[in-house]
Image (cartoon, grey):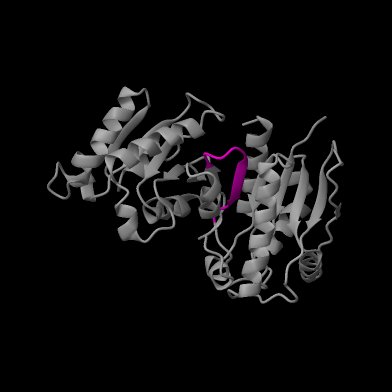
Amino acid sequence: MNIPRIGITLGDPGGIGPEIIIKALAQKSALPEAHYVLYGCSFILKEEEKALGIKLDYSSFSEKEKPDRFLISLYEIKTPLKSIKRGKASRENGLASFFFFKRAVEEARRGKIQALVTGPVSKQSWSLAGIEWLGHTDYLEHFYPQAIMAFWSKELKVALLSHHLPLKKALRKVKKEYLLKFFQDLQKSLKKIDPARYQFLVAGLNPHAGESGLLGKEEEEEIMPAVREAKQRGMNIRGPLAPDIVFREALGHSDRIVISLYHDQGLIAFKLKAFEIGVNLTLGIPFVRTSPDHGTAFDVAGKRMASPRSLIEAIKLAYELSSGSF
């Protein structure tokens, strides 16, 4: 039996990434059968295992190995990291987490792993390390400009027109041409999952979706024309819908995806409903990439209280999408 090879990056060593990864992989019965390849450093794992009182059964990674059962391997990556600074951003942690991610992406692009699950990183740590990208999706856009940040759960699904941008810059993207291209890229990215399954609900930008122009012109001048043209091209799409009701329209409907016009418009609703079970999914790239829907949680790092639940859901979704069992 062939099983998928799923890469997992440890994330920022100073955050909860190593903790939730060890906790998740220790729950073998909760995970699908796959070859899990950890991208990181053995000393990080050993320190975390000791602190948690958990011993993972893993071996050194070999590309030649083709397991047919649950297996954990470590792809050892050299970094300048000598000790772990927990609970805060640091240059050393930023470099380490970037090196883990960079190598894993290289392996995914070469087809050596079928899916990639990423542990949380700190944008501040990356900045301190001189890394120009603002997180995982921003780096992936360097190779795949059509990459889309989406958030996935059974109860609610959201795709973001823009993600890690200041609000003023994000609002500049609410233009007909940019919207139409995004709609088409989103539909194309979902073809491998289910080409005819999803209906797209476009959020308005202004209160009451502009109230026929009384509360803002973007809906009538930019969003409506883009939605109208997308419909003409065969998309199952509605909108713009008032931002305060669009998520209720999608909630509980697994075949509906809200298109949010900026980061917080979508993420406030999503995390309110699905914080512990939600998954960050990158669409529009040639391999599967998921992550938990939360960050490094520096405030609880080292306290051994972090829940691995979102990470487990990210692993399950990565398996389903990479094995065709979705």
Q: Is residue 273 left or right of residue 106?
A: left
Q: Is residue 199 left or right of residue 144?
A: left
Which quadrant holds the C terminus? top right
Which quadrant holds the N terminus? top right
* Quarter residue 325 falls in: top right
Comparing 248 with 293, the one in front is: 293
Whether the magenta-drawn stretch holds residue 10 is answered as no
Instruction: Report the residue at 14% width, 41% height from top.
Output: 212
Q: Is residue 85 left or right of residue 34?
A: left
Magenta residues span 283-293
- Report x, y in % for residue 269: 41, 51
Comparing 209 with 250, the one in front is: 209
Whether the magenta-drawn stretch holds residue 288 is answered as yes
Residue 194 sits above or below residue 46 on the image: above
Instruction: Report the residue at 56% width, 69% height from top.
Output: 130
Q: From this viewpoint, is residue 15 visible?
A: no
| Figure disc tally | 0
* Quarter residue 113 falls in: top right
Residue 113 sits above or below residue 324 on the image: below
